[in-house]
Image: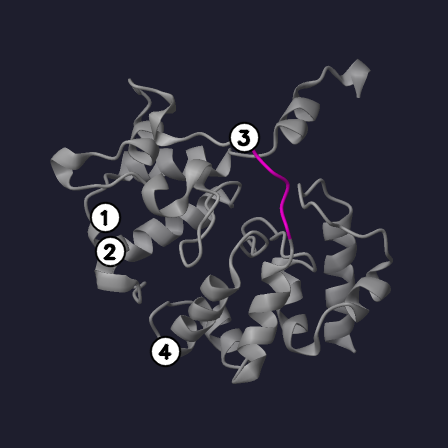
Amino acid sequence: MKFLLQVITIIAIGASRNLAIADIPAQSPKELLQTVPTQAQVCLTCHGVNGEGLGVIGPRLAGLSSEYIASQLVNFQMGNRQSPTMSAMAATVQGDAIQVVADFFAAKTVAEIPLQYRGDKVVITDTAEKLAYQGDWGRDIPACTSCHGPSGIGAANFPRLAGQEPSYLKNQLLAWQNGTRKGDVDNMMANIAAKLTADEIDALSAYFSALKPLVQNAAAQQPLAQK
């Protein structure tokens, strides 16, 4: 009962925020909880009923592919990713339940954002933007978007970066650097992260986190009198 009350409280908080999630239904917290598969309910306290994430508490799952979510649950179970909380939670999701959870959150869509492609600008001076779209081939660093898609919207087993919590993005790059996160094909991300400086990690985390829908950004920039 205590867990149920915690989940309902989190749902109520999440539903009241401007989350840029495209399909938040107008339902009460209890009604929303009834739409969530039993196997996924343990995830709601940290990730929200629509997978919108809850800041530093838990990253956003909406916008990630089912393939990626499932693979990360397995990585936590196998010890390829380190987190006392997530390792314990992932251990409760076994067998067919992994796909149920992955499919549920993958179906939660996010609002569209303007897409920027590698060739949109010839000269890029901003540190993060240059790494994102052009990379640094002098250090064998490919462009982030060559795998993660234009504007970092994600592609298959390459997760969406756009709009993700900045501290989460930073912590994952650091985890790749120090070897506490593993499980990627050919050790690709570990090799890339090892070549990034602390300033570049901060810049990339801030850059991708800030890539959000224009409608939301425009609303935030309106004078108070117009809101």
Q: Earlier in the sequence, mark 1 or mark 3?
A: 3
Which amino acid type is shown beneath numbered disc 1?
Ile
Q: Callout 3: few (<14), some (14-19), or many (20+) C-alpha neighbours within 10 Å?
A: few
Mark 1 to mark 2: distance in Å? 6 Å
Q: Earlier in the sequence, mark 3 or mark 4?
A: 4
Mark 2 to mark 4: distance in Å? 19 Å
Which amino acid type is shown beneath numbered disc 3?
Pro
**Which quadrant would residue 12 be assigned to in this image?**
bottom right
Q: Nearer the viewer, residue 97 or 182?
A: 97
The N terminus appears in which quarter of the rendering?
A: bottom right
SS majority, magenta: loop
- Figure label count: 4
Mark number, residue 192: 1
What residue would you read off at disc 3?
114
Which amino acid type is shown beneath numbered disc 4?
Met
Kindly indicate whether the residue at mark 4 contacts the one at mark 1 (C-beta within 8 angstroms).
Answer: no
Mark 1, secondary structure of its residue: helix
The C terminus appears in which quarter of the rendering?
A: top right
